[in-house]
């Protein structure tokens, strides 16, 4: 379509009378009435739009855009973190989650059960859940599609230097990371990973029943849990207590099982911010039976939603705990 001769305001498409006669109405169009010989064929609504555009001087689009986009307008809500080569996938589609379960040390028999359970639960939440054990998938471009990466009972040094750089860039640019169980027994020689996971695995007693104290029930990962949560799992001790660096969500009551070595303050699930990203860790999930427990699944799915930015939770470390 040819534009009418003369100056054209920036951002405004000015169309000929013939184009207007044909009934074209692009979304941000103000149609110039000059040259329209037979305007009677236009509908009343179209004539009204022409008049409004003329009053405005044909100088601005009909859609002013969201609040906050224009000087003097009210501030709009904060937008999503920009997507970059190392950053997370932007909003606008389903949340994509990558499960990574490579093991170079002990391998948990529960991994296939966990993958199947998380795929089912993710689908119910409208998430797309992919799974890999290939470290070649952990690249800047490979992670670009995802909002969350899950280290699912990984063990050993599962990434090379390029993979480490890609994961760190992804999280610090705004991506989410969730560590499950043996994720704390991973990448022992990488200092930044200890910051990400919060604490490193030290030891564990035999699998047994214990009581978990849910000390923060405002987080999506704990909102559906009781204050005292009795369950069977393999209970980790850590080389250091992460309290003060993370927001502790749940602790173990060592009086309810044998072999605990951290004393009265034994964190077992926590979250924190890392750069612009979100990091969550839970020590549960050793047993295959864990992945059939409704409460444990709600715990992990809540963590995924929080890490993806689909649910809010305060993960700022509390002073003194």
Image (spheres, rainbow, N blue to C red):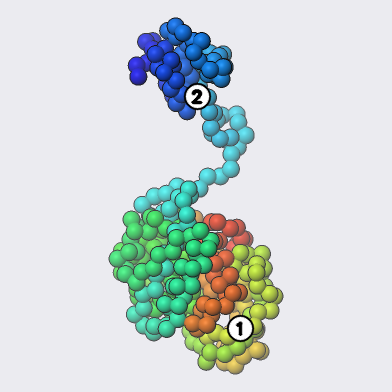
Q: Position of residue 55 (x, y in %)?
A: 56, 13
The image quarter containing residue 97 is bottom left
Circle 1 sits on which residue? 231
Q: Is residue 74 left or right of residue 14?
A: right
Q: Position of residue 201 (x, y in %)?
A: 48, 81
Q: Position of residue 287 (x, y in %)?
A: 50, 83
Front position in the image: 11 or 117: 117
Q: Is residue 82 left or right of residue 302?
A: left
State which quarter of the image contains the C terminus: bottom right
The image quarter containing residue 163 is bottom left
233 to 196, vertically: above or below: below
Front position in the image: 116 or 278: 116
Circle 2 sits on which residue? 61
Marks 1 and 2, how far apart at CA: 60 Å
152 to 310, vertically: above or below: below
Q: Residue at x 39, y 83 (%)?
A: 107
Q: Secondary structure beneath disc 1?
A: strand
């Amino acid at each position: 379509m040819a534009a009418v001769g003369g100056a054209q305001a920036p951002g405004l498409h000015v169309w000929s009378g013939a184009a207007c006669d044909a009934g074209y109405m692009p979304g941000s169009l103000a149609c110039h009435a000059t040259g329209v010989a037979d305007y009677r064929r236009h509908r009343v609504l179209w004539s009204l739009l022409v008049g409004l555009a003329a009053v405005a001087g044909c100088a601005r689009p009909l859609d002013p855009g969201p609040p906050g986009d224009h000087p003097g307008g009210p501030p709009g809500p904060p937008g999503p973190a920009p997507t970059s080569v190392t950053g997370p996938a932007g909003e606008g589609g389903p949340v994509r989650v990558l499960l990574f379960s490579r093991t170079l040390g002990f391998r948990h028999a529960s991994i296939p059960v966990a993958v199947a359970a998380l795929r089912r639960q993710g689908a119910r939440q409208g998430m797309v859940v992919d799974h890999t054990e290939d470290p070649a998938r952990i690249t800047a471009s490979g992670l670009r599609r995802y909002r969350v990466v899950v280290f699912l009972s990984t063990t050993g040094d599962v990434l090379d230097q390029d993979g480490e750089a890609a994961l760190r860039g992804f999280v610090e640019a705004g991506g989410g990371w969730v560590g499950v169980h043996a994720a704390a027994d991973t990448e022992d020689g990488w200092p930044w990973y200890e910051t990400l996971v919060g604490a490193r695995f030290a030891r564990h007693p035999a699998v047994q029943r214990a009581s978990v104290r849910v000390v923060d029930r405002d987080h999506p990962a704990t909102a559906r849990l009781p204050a005292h949560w009795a369950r069977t799992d393999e209970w980790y001790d850590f080389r250091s207590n992460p309290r003060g660096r993370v927001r502790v969500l749940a602790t173990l009551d060592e009086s309810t099982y044998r072999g605990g070595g951290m004393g009265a303050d034994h964190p077992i699930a926590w979250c924190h911010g890392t750069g612009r990203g979100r990091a969550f860790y839970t020590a549960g999930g050793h047993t295959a039976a864990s992945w059939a427990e409704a409460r444990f699944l709600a715990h992990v799915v809540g963590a995924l939603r929080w890490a993806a930015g689909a649910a809010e939770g305060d993960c700022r470390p509390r002073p003194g705990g």
